[in-house]
């Protein structure tokens, strides 16, 4: 698809969705996007992570946040044309980044601008996924209560429409993943307050099914990962040092849980490793691997990292962004081999990254978090990696 057209839906409100009785089309095959784990391609891993050239692109006008809601974006998704869509948490617009052209601009309808003062930031959207129909589905957190669907048009423009939820929120959704093969039906499993939720979008609405688990009650879930066996895993805020993991069958929604001793952290983020396991990362700089058989890998902590968003790079290394960019070697017992790639860009100790995604050629794009800076950071490998756009669009990696 081309990227040269104008961006529609940029000045007015979002339009309504379509017919709730109509299923969404399955379009992955039109771009060669992997629909099963067996279709993924993992290049030969290097002995060291790629070296990057770092560039910055500034959004104009500058982003505006408040002390009551300081996190600019929460998550980003790669579009079918290779651009990146940043998901607004506290800012009032979406943003689109073209890593090839080195540009970034605001897009879409203005969002809620008046936010109540609350113990937790009343964000608009928190994460998004690329659906079976190659449209982006942004997950409502608190200030917004409908799902925003973003369509990339043939001329490169973007249109926005809202889909109502069958179970009214706010559910404080924060991170989701395309949970199963599209041939089994379009389903998102998202993290939220009190557990996980199955979201089944049609052309005009979203059926919401809470996934019950007594162990999840009273806990906040942030981030999910889809394993190689198509189960979905998530870890909530712990009670003391208790580390809980929920495992969900993406078809039946049957749920099980495991627990163990882990550093007490308020939030967890997850990525899928090339072995089909889950890589876990925390704001305190603690990382480990949650294996598909229920076991847990060794634990490593780099307190200064303030890590938030991990992504698999398809190079044998898992990258994590926060106040720093770090890489973990998947070939050694993770996370025993760690490399600091980029120091913090300020000294506030905040999450300077609001989301990290992998794009074609191995380019990483990091969108603004709680830094107060209107800067998108682009990490371009010194040597182009053999990573096709279709792989970057796969549901195991193109999500938050």
Image (spheres, grey):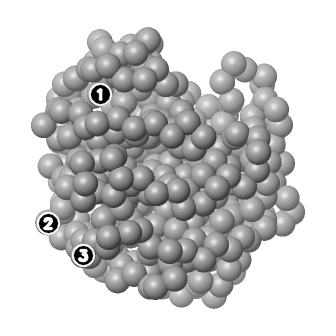
Residue toward you, 275 or 199: 275
Q: Which mark is residue 232?
A: none
Q: Is residue 206 visible?
A: no
Residue drawn at x 54%, y 61% as measured from the top left: 341
Question: According to the image, label 1 marks what residue?
Answer: 245
Cα distance, mark 3 to mark 1? 31 Å
Q: Give the vertical position of 156 relative to 256 (above or below).
A: below
Residue drawn at x 13%, y 37% as measured from the top left: 293
Looking at the image, tell me whether mark 3 or mark 1 is earlier in sequence order: 3
Looking at the image, tell me whether mark 2 or mark 1 is earlier in sequence order: 2
Residue 49 lies in quadrant = bottom left
Q: Is residue 209 visible?
A: yes
Q: Secondary structure at mark 1?
A: strand
Question: According to the image, label 3 marks what residue?
Answer: 44
Question: According to the image, label 2 marks what residue?
Answer: 38
Looking at the image, tell me whether mark 3 or mark 2 is earlier in sequence order: 2
Residue drawn at x 83%, y 48% as measured from the top left: 64
């Amino acid at each position: 698809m081309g990227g040269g057209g104008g961006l529609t839906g940029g000045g007015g409100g979002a339009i309504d969705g379509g017919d709730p009785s109509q299923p969404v089309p399955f379009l992955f095959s039109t771009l060669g996007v992997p629909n099963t784990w067996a279709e993924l391609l993992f290049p030969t891993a290097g002995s060291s992570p790629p070296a990057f050239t770092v560039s910055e692109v500034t959004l104009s006008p500058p982003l505006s946040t408040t002390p009551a809601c300081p996190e600019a974006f929460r998550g980003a998704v790669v579009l079918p044309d290779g651009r990146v869509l940043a998901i607004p948490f506290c800012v009032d617009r979406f943003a689109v980044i073209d890593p090839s052209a080195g540009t970034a601009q605001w897009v879409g309808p203005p969002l809620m601008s008046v936010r109540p003062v609350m113990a937790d930031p009343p964000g608009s959207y928190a994460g998004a996924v690329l659906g079976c129909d190659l449209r982006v589905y942004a997950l409502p957190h608190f200030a917004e209560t409908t799902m925003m669907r973003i369509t990339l048009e043939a001329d490169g423009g973007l249109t926005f429409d809202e889909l109502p939820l069958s179970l009214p929120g706010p559910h404080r959704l924060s991170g989701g993943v395309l949970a199963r093969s599209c041939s089994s039906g379009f389903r998102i499993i998202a993290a939220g307050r009190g557990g996980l939720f199955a979201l089944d979008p049609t052309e005009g609405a979203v059926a919401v099914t809470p996934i019950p688990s007594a162990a999840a009650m009273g806990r906040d879930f942030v981030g999910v990962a889809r394993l190689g066996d198509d189960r979905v895993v998530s870890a909530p805020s712990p009670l003391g040092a208790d580390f809980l993991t929920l495992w969900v069958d993406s078809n039946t929604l049957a749920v099980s849980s495991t627990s163990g001793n882990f550093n007490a952290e308020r939030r967890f983020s997850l990525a899928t490793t090339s072995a089909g396991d889950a890589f876990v990362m925390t704001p305190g700089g603690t990382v480990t691997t949650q294996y598909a058989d229920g076991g847990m890998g060794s634990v490593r902590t780099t307190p200064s990292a303030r890590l938030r968003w991990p992504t698999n790079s398809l190079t044998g290394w898992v990258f994590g962004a926060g106040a720093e960019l770090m890489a973990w070697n998947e070939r050694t017992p993770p996370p025993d081999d760690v490399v600091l790639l980029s120091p913090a860009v300020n000294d506030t100790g905040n999450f300077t990254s609001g989301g990290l995604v992998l794009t074609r050629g191995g380019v990483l794009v990091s969108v603004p978090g709680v830094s107060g800076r209107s800067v998108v950071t682009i990490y371009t490998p010194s040597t182009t990696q053999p990573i096709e756009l279709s792989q970057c669009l796969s549901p195991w990696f193109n999500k938050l």
